[in-house]
Amino acid sequence: MKTYFVDSFTNQKYKGNPAAVCLPETDLDAAEMQSIAAEIGFSETAFIKPLTDNTYSIRFFSPKTEIPLCGHATLASSKIVFSTTSLDSITFINYDNVELAIEKEDQKIKMFFPVYDTEETVVPQKMLDALGISETISLRYSPNNKIILIEIESAHELADLKPDFTALINSHTGISGVLVTAASDSTDFDFHYRYFWPWAGTNEDPVTGGIQTFLTKYWATKLNKTKLRAYQSSLRTGTMSTELLQDKVSILGEAVIVLEGEFIL
């Protein structure tokens, strides 16, 4: 099976978020795809298959479970399709039949994702303690993503968080992850964020695109602007530009191919 490793949301190798992109020539069942994703060990492995000339099915697996929607693995998959074909626009269809329109934009790739709302929520104190957070500005929840959003005061504090992941995973059930965000402390970006998801994937996702389905709307409303620059302050770091449209969010990023090979089935 043709397989690629791609670093997403970066223009430098070994930065951003690595994803595997697999192109199976025969149908694989979910158990096989899950085993492959666990073997590779990245936060996400995508399996893509052409349906028509410019439409592909796509499925996402973390090392632990199937994920309905993943930004960095979609970006990685788009990079492979655009690098191996003459196409400059494609559509991915995920497991839930959500259509994801993708366009080439010079050396970058623009993805159009759905927009989801958040609602007020209560966060257990033991979760805040596990994250090392003493004060919060806002506590929200995205039902579509099953992700808690916590806004804190300082981007510097955000970068310095050192969660206790054993305590974190025991602090809540029934969620996929917790997103911590803060307004940027520089003019280069509008907001910073980090994403922790030991419930469904790895401890920390290096760069996360899928959360922009609700995070872009959150900050667009708060900052009263529709075009935003985001910085993920993980160890590997990553950046992207987003824009809130009427019923979509556009996510603009770069990706770098770092490995091409064959996975032996």
Image (cartoon, rainbow, N blue to C red):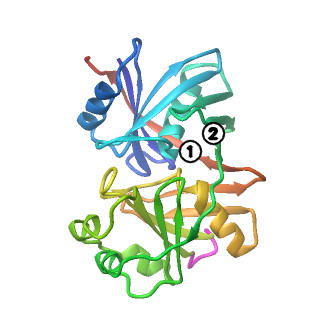
- Provide residue 222's location: percent of width, then percent of height: 68, 75
Q: Are marks 2 and 1 in contact (CB under 8 Å)?
A: yes
Kind of residue sitting beneath label 2: Gln
Q: Is residue 240 visible?
A: no
Residue 165 picture quarter: bottom left
The quarter of the picture where the N terminus appears is: top left
| Magenta-colored stretch includes residue 71 | no
Task: Look at the numbered disc 2 and give the secondary structure of its residue.
Answer: loop
Mark yes or no: residue 231 visible: yes
CA distance separating discs 2 and 1: 7 Å
Q: Which residue type does callout 1 highlight?
A: Glu
Verify whether residue 187 appears in magenta: yes
Residue 171 image offset from top left, x and y in percent? 29, 70
Q: Taking 127 as reference, is 256 above or below it?
A: above
Residue plotted at (25% across, 17% down):
264
- Left or right: residue 1 versus residue 120 is left
* Circle 2 Cα neighbour tier, 10 Å, few/some/many (<14 / 14–19 / ≥20): few
Is 165 on the left-hand or right-hand side of 111? left
Q: What's the mark number on residue 254?
A: 1
> Considering the image in quadrants, where does the C terminus appear?
top left
43 relative to 265, above or below: below
Specify the principal SS of the magenta part: loop
Q: Looking at the picture, does residue 125 appear above or below residue 247? A: below
**Magenta-tinted stretch:** 184-189
Q: Which residue is mark 2?
A: 107
User: In the image, what residue occupies the spot 54% across and 33% down?
Assistant: 94
Which label number is shown at residue 226?
Answer: none
User: Which quadrant holds residue 164?
Assistant: bottom left
x, y percent for residue 119: 58, 68
Residue pushed farthest left?
Answer: 166
| SS for callout 1 | loop
